[in-house]
Amino acid sequence: MKRWGEAFFDDDALTGADVVAQAQIAVVVADRFSHLRYWNAFARELFGFADDRDHIGMSLLDLGIHESDQEHASQLARRVLRGGTWEGSFAVVRGDSSWVHVRAQAVPLKDASGAIDGIVLFANEAMRSGRVEEQYGLLERVGSRLAGSLEFDSTMKAVAEILVPQFADHCFIDLFDHDRLVRRVSVHSEGWSPPPGTWFDVGDDVRYPDRHFVYTAMRRVETVLVSDYAHAVNAPSEGSARVAEQVGLTSAIAAPLRARGELLGVLTLALSRLSPREKVHYSGFDRDLVGAIASRVALAIDNARLFEEERSTALAFQNSLLPSSFPPFDGLSIAHRYVPAKPLETHGHGIQTQVGGDFYDVIPLSAGRVGIVIGDVEGRGPHAAAVMGQLRAALRAFAQADREPADILRELDEWVRQLGRPDGEGGTWVPSVSCLYMVYDAWSRELSYANAGHQAPLLISDGDVEELALEVSDTLLGVKLKGVPYDDAIYHQADLTLPPGATLLLYTDGLVDRRPLGGAIDIERSMAQLYGRIREVADKDVEQIAQSAVTAVPGEIDDDTALLVVRAHPGELAMEEGWFVAEAPTVGEARHLAASTFKDWGMDRDQAELACLLVSEIVTNVVIHATPHPVRREFTPDGVRDSGEAFESAEAGDIGDIGGADSVGGAGGVGADEFDEDWSDLLDEVAEDTGGPSRSEFLLRLRRGASSAWVEVYDNDLRLPRIRSAGADDEGGRGLYLVDQLATRWGSRPTPDGKAVWFEVPLKSE
């Protein structure tokens, strides 16, 4: 035979090109840059090339070499291009997604001058010939593949993909679930499936006869070989025996799966006529090989089970620290997601990477307002999750006390410092935490916020998506140093107004810090993908937006992700308010405004009367204690007694039958002054400076939601009210007690100009 393309001396001889084309071995030629230049028909069949695609110029790695072997193949090319040869095996995923293990030999291709011009690869399917070195290579491949996964289902699937069809035509894995033996894997070559009701299917309880070779393997805890299946006895059923005969079952091996002294199940492999192979019967060497494989499989399954238990525990711990659901909020739709990190599926980093410090919350505040928070604790693991849990609990407590956002972040900064731990070098490691806290009023669409280094939310409005413009962003919690300038040492607060019907998407960095397979993290590309996907679903409900955001950026999730989607629905809300002079006659005016408003809103009559009663109590309290009219002070044997003109007028009016009023920070009604502070002298001075007594005013604000109404009363007094203990003979002191007993919720909060007292009542009687 001469060079390719030249004929033999015999006129009927084949050309060299014909020989290569018809050879029953794959021949692939690549240039120095590993670009394909030639392949024969056998290579097309072996690697599963698509007939309608031109593969000239395609990279050698694009033959379908599995990603776990691509570095191996790159080393092959470099070695051959340096003049060496290479022999080994690698896994290939064909165009139809089937697997094949290839045994290959690569040699350099030289031109006429002797310079290396490329690579010639000769390849054939491994294991079908039964060569001993290939079988040992299979054992090594099984071990390396099992070591790369801790997921239970992935582990067993990887075993089946390796063994079928390279070493067997049928692979079964049966595992014990308490006292039941359950089939977990059933894989067959050539895409074949047994008829229903014949062989056990995945999920079925498996029972073998006492003399069946699989039962014997489990009972003896040793690998059992059936070299000629024609002599096998006691099939599980007549249907099973009939199907075994139809597919031409020739040989089988059953190996017990045993780890840490416990029998986990059994691995069964069988040969049949489904696929052509030179070796159709297993030997004693194959039995020993399967026994070695089974020991590795059993250890991997045991590790996977332990991992699943730890993972379930870790995720339950994580989920217990985050809200699983939120109560209905008037005027708002809310969706939330938490996605744990998943690096251990591909890298096996350990269970501690599953839990993290990302958190979110939506907190009901006074008068229908809500606190919205999202944050991220530095690092991962149980300590980060524990810090997150404590931080979220502290934030919720501060928020429900109606603290201002900037004050809450200042308190949290101190709190984080107390959660440090020794760093092993004599110092203390304090976690850094990003946190964005917002207070949203759905009626006015006003948003107050303070930001400790967290990324700005996305604003979705009128089909457009943009970053919410935040004027302030301060240092992360836990990292501030002493002695820094004042502006850097405090947390700032700002306000903004959202557009009608706006939607906010709050997220942590795990949503976009995702690494594509084989690539690097690109934040700009990830943000572009996120923006594009959100625009597509901007008019959908919040659940669809949340789900789309979670899947918008493909890639490996190396960091956990917290996500909140909040949409305002101002159409279902209503508000009415009015300013009144803090004098006795205005109590009736305020009550009249409340009664007419509740009637317009369709509130039940009984509920409206109850709400008006509570309005009278709160307003009376304001009139008595917030008015700057303590004009007469009497010195009596019982002590100093103050009486105001406003209250004397109130006694003459019609408000004395509504239960009396409480002291703002002390006693109520006429009697000894029990305020902690007496500001009457200051008020007199202010009145003198203005040329006469000033008239204090208060604001009555009424809010309607889907099922509740809120009443707020604003005044200029800085002292917060509290319930007092009234004696049996006291005429007053029971006003706030009535509010506490009859309202769904009530409370008070400081405002920049004074305070606000509020309560909530349902629109309909229960």
Image: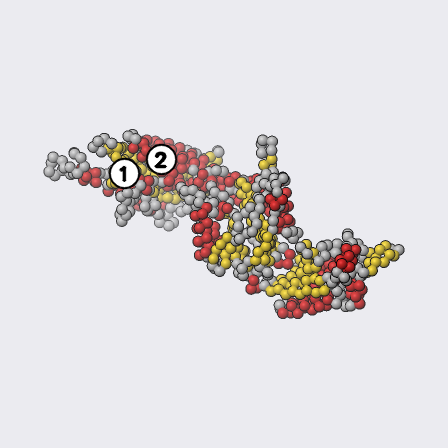
Where is residue 135 shown, x and y percent of the image?
A: 34, 33
Inspect the image, locate mark 1, and give the three-letter code of the amino acid beneath it.
Answer: Ala
Q: Secondary structure at mark 1?
A: strand
Contact? badges 1 and 2 (CB < 8 Å): no
Label 1 sits on residue: 30
> Counting residues from the N terminus, which is met first, the one under dot 1 or under dot 2?
1
Where is residue 65 shown, x and y percent of the image?
A: 34, 40
Q: Secondary structure at mark 2?
A: helix
Label 2 sits on residue: 72
Of badges 1 and 2, the one in the foreground is 1
Residue 761 in view:
no
Residue at the (40%, 41%) spot, across then down: 518
- The image quadrant where one finds the N terminus is top left
Crowdedness near tag 2: few (<14), some (14–19) or many (≥20) residues, C-alpha within 10 Å: some
Q: Nearer the viewer, residue 165 or 252?
A: 165
The vertical placement of 25 against 619, above or below, is above
Residue at the (34%, 34%) spot, across then down: 75
Where is residue 66 shown, x and y percent of the image?
A: 36, 40
Where is residue 305 shown, x and y percent of the image?
A: 48, 40
Q: Is residue 54 left or right of residue 625?
A: left
Q: Residue furthest right?
A: 637
Q: Is residue 525 left or right of residue 109?
A: right
Inspect the image, locate mark 2, and give the three-letter code of the amino acid beneath it.
Answer: His
Please state the total of marks drawn on the protein image: 2
